[in-house]
Amino acid sequence: MMDRREMMLVIGAGPCGLSHAKALNAAGIAYEQVEADDEVGGNWYHGTYRTAHIISSRRTTEFTDFPMPASYPDFPSQQQMGEYYKLYADSFDLRPHIEFRAKVTGVRPRSDQRWDVELATGEQRVYKGVLVCNGHHWDKRFPSYPGEFSGEYIHSKDFKDPKQLEGKRVLVIGGGNSACDVVSEAARVSTSAHLSLRRGYWMTPKTVFGKPSIESPLMGLPIFVQRLMLRGLLRIVVGKYEDYGLPRPDHKIFEKHPTISTEIFHYLKHGRIKPRPNIERFESNTVHFNDGTSDEYDMIVAATGFYLSFPFLPSGLVPMINEQLAALYAGCVLPEYKHLYIIGTQQVRYGIGPLLTPGSRLVAKMIKMQDEMELPIGLVMKESGYKLPETHLVDPIAALRRMRMAGFFLRRLAKKELKLRKRLSPPTRTQWQLGSDPDMQVY
Ligand SMILES: Cc1cc2nc3c(=O)[nH]c(=O)nc-3n(C[C@H](O)[C@H](O)[C@H](O)COP(=O)(O)OP(=O)(O)OC[C@H]3O[C@@H](n4cnc5c(N)ncnc54)[C@H](O)[C@@H]3O)c2cc1C
Ligand SMILES: NC(=O)c1ccc[n+]([C@@H]2O[C@H](COP(=O)([O-])OP(=O)(O)OC[C@H]3O[C@@H](n4cnc5c(N)ncnc54)[C@H](OP(=O)(O)O)[C@@H]3O)[C@@H](O)[C@H]2O)c1
């Protein structure tokens, strides 16, 4: 077997891990892949509810080099998504490289520029580099309020089946896609379904003119034109949010990740969902809202999002600009380290497929280029004046445009590195301690 010191490790076999594994394979880069669970597909295998259908459309979620089966609808189900990723792994013969039930509990930089990796079994390995594709929709973010709620209090991540909501008085917190999905499920099966919003959101129906709204031909136009036209369109298709009892959005369209739901409008108009304002406090099973009203509930579902989390990396190794944004050059590398690629931390405005295929190929190119460099490619980017991202939200059309130019910029980076070598030496390495925990939660 090849020495792992010359190999890359891909952590995770969700959509990102699979796509990167395929790109490494195609580029002839030696790698191994580990997956904590017993199957590929990540969130679409173990992380979404039984009744989930994607909000991004099939066309904007499938990999560009592997279309979804022709029989799939515009918005495939959780089960169809799971099958699709299995099909992808089988078609490109990725399984032989994947070790299932292999949980990484520690990744630490070594003084020889390589990476120590520890598995939950206690096994220690050394790799040339690591691609972190561990997914970022699992580390639950709960809101906090004064008082204590005596009913059932779960996160949207713990919602797996509508049966959990049956016959209960349910309050869902949040204005994102999880909140709209869960409260719509509650509208069908619960005694009552309330939705607590701390602001107004640009909620958009799933289809416009019979097509997924996310596939709008407006994409690609200047952002102010998109905003103007979308506002007009929403006025016609939805009307005023206030007419549904929803607060007016307090931000511009696309300043937040889009909330896409048709059902929310349907059930609001049928009186099956009742909007409520922000929560002031809990008192036993009563929730007091900040407009002075209150109600009793059996269950609260906090659909309040997730933290970016890399529990197996030393704390602080990936600096955070804010809770949702990691300080990574080109969205994936650090200036201090060679061959550490942190993948998928940003939030694409539509599905991930069309960006993942070219993005993975680009990472493979960066790995080959890094092999030729003495300095970390992230440091060369920093010294060349590359900027850190200012937001975790990605405009897919702009990102694709940048990717098309990337070959040219990579060649320039290679030249720049030759010059920088003369005046810079590789950064000295912090000695990180690993607090490796075999029971560490990773998804
Ligand atoms: C309810 C819901 C609906 C969504 N709908 C959409 C949608 O419509 N369109 C869309 O584009 N996106 C959607 N998403 C986002 C979704 O997370 C992505 O589509 C996709 O799953 C991200 O792929 P990933 O590979 O980065 O992460 P994941 O799918 O989370 O995969 C990560 C994998 O890494 C493994 N792993 C993690 N840590 C370790 C470790 N330490 N050791 C070994 N293995 C590890 C995990 O077991 C997992 O299999 C949705 C998310 C949720 C929660
Ligand atoms: N069917 C689907 O395809 C589907 C379903 C679910 C999720 N998803 C995807 O999964 C990802 C995660 O979505 P998500 O909805 O779980 O998380 P999210 O997009 O981060 O949304 C979290 C929501 O909770 C609100 N919130 C956060 N803290 C709050 C607090 N303290 N009090 C009140 N509200 C609070 C946020 O409002 P603020 O804006 O005010 O912070 C936001 O509306 C997204 O990519 C999403 O598209 C897709």
Image (spheres, helix red, strand yellow):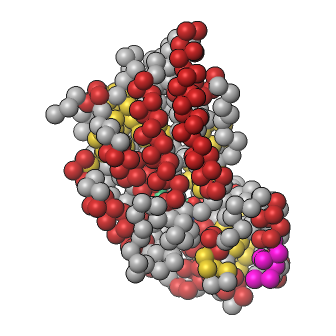
Q: On the picture, is 307 further left or further right than 46? A: right
Compared with 428, 366 (above or below) is: below
Instruction: Please state which of residues 201 and 365 is positioned toward the viewer in this rendering.
Output: 365
* Majority SS type along the magenta span: helix
At horizontal 28% and vertical 61% (from top left) the residue drawn is: 91
Magenta residue check for 338 = no
* Residue sticking out furthest to the left: 1
Report the span colored magenta.
231-237
At horizontal 50% and vertical 48% (from top left) the residue drawn is: 359
* Residue sticking out furthest to the bottom: 270
Q: Is residue 248 in view?
A: yes
At horizontal 73% and vertical 76% (from top left) the residue drawn is: 275
Point out residue 247 in the picture as x, y percentages from the top left corner.
Answer: 81, 71
Q: Is residue 141 in view?
A: no
Point out residue 317 in the picture as x, y percentages from the top left corner.
Answer: 52, 29
Point out residue 146 in the picture as x, y percentages from the top left corner.
Answer: 70, 55
At horizontal 63% and vertical 59% (from top left) the residue drawn is: 349
The image quadrant that residue 432 belongs to is top left
Compared with 233, 278 (above or below) is: above
Q: On the picture, is 309 further left or further right than 388? A: left
Image quadrant occupied by the N terminus: top left
Count of numbered labels shown in the rendering: 0
The image quadrant that residue 202 belongs to is bottom right
Point out residue 47 in the picture as x, y percentages from the top left corner.
Answer: 43, 62
The image quadrant that residue 248 belongs to is bottom right
Ligand 1, what quadrant?
Answer: bottom left
